[in-house]
Amino acid sequence: MTESNDVNSAMFAMLDAVAPPLAPYTRDRIIDELWHRPGLSTRDRAIVTLATLIARNAAQAYPYYTNKALDSGVAPVEVSELVVHLAFYAGWPSAVGALAVIKDVFASRGIGRDALAPCELDLLPSTAIPDGVGQDAYIGSEVASVSPALAHFSRDLLDQEIWRRPDLAPRDRSLATVTALAALGQTERFPLYVSRAIALGVTTEQLGEALAHTAFYGGWGLAHQAALALGRSLQLETGATQQLRDPTTL
């Protein structure tokens, strides 16, 4: 029996001992249905789930889902980069809390330092990361006028360095970021990140499927809130695209 099967058996034994109905819901609705829906690959679902768990600081679930991510094609360096990325969106304590558990998973699989994210590396060109709707105006006026320090770190560190690190594809960063913001209930900036995600190749179907994971792993209220924000963001995205195509607006 593999380690993940051992964890599965222990989890189902715990569910049966305390909340028996959760066992069939977990097996039938999450494992057999959610994870096998065709709108999002298993690899993407693993990234989305880890992003949700780290955002929610759900440490007990890290071992199983880190192993599932690695078994689903997420490379160790991508898991490492995902934690680095989410430190900026979920906060340092949540990222460090994840590292404390994930390091044991890496050790058990013989994953060494040479397979993880390097500290220094050549960044992707700045043109690889689209700005998204309203980014420059938001940072330049609303943020800088209140917190010049936040504007500085947002531009020079988050946008110009973290997003340009090459060991996690920009498209995957976008998918993870939208999911983490949904799981945190921080949907005010969805227009920027949804616009960026679509520009990087994330489809609207994939974004919708990611919110189903938010529901199961982060909570239904947060998922519904994010769905409303996603709908508004897509309307803005459609309007902006139509305006660009209409020569009378130029």
Image (spheres, helix red, strand yellow):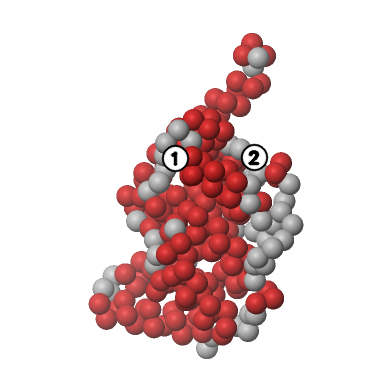
Amino acid type at circle 2 is Pro
Q: CA distance from mark 1 to mark 2?
A: 24 Å
Which residue is painted at 45% across and 33% down in the image? 145
Is residue 207 visible to the viewer in this orientation of the structure?
Answer: no
Q: Position of residue 204 (x, y in %)?
A: 55, 42
Percent x, y for residue 240?
A: 57, 26
Neighbour tally class for label 1: few under 14, some 14-19, many 20 plus, Cα within 10 Å = few
Residue drawn at (71%, 54%) of the image = 123
- x, y percentage for residue 200? 65, 44
Is 146 on the left-hand or right-hand side of 136? left
Q: Seen from this angle, which residue lies furthest top? A: 248
Label 1 element class: loop
Give the answer, above or below, for where 137 lies relative to 149. Answer: above
Count neighbours of disc 2 (C-alpha within 10 A) and say few if under 14, some if 14 to 19, many if 20 or more.
Answer: some
Comparing marks 1 and 2, which lies closer to the viewer? 1
Nearest to N terminus: mark 1 or mark 2:
2
- Check the image and report above or below for 53 versus 238: below
Q: Nearer the viewer, residue 242 or 162?
A: 162
Q: Quadrant of residue 167?
A: bottom right
Q: Which mark is residue 147?
A: 1
Looking at this view, is 42 or 242 the one in front? 242
Q: Residue at x 65, y 14 (%)?
A: 250
Residue under label 2: 130
Tell me where residue 214 sits by quadrant: bottom left
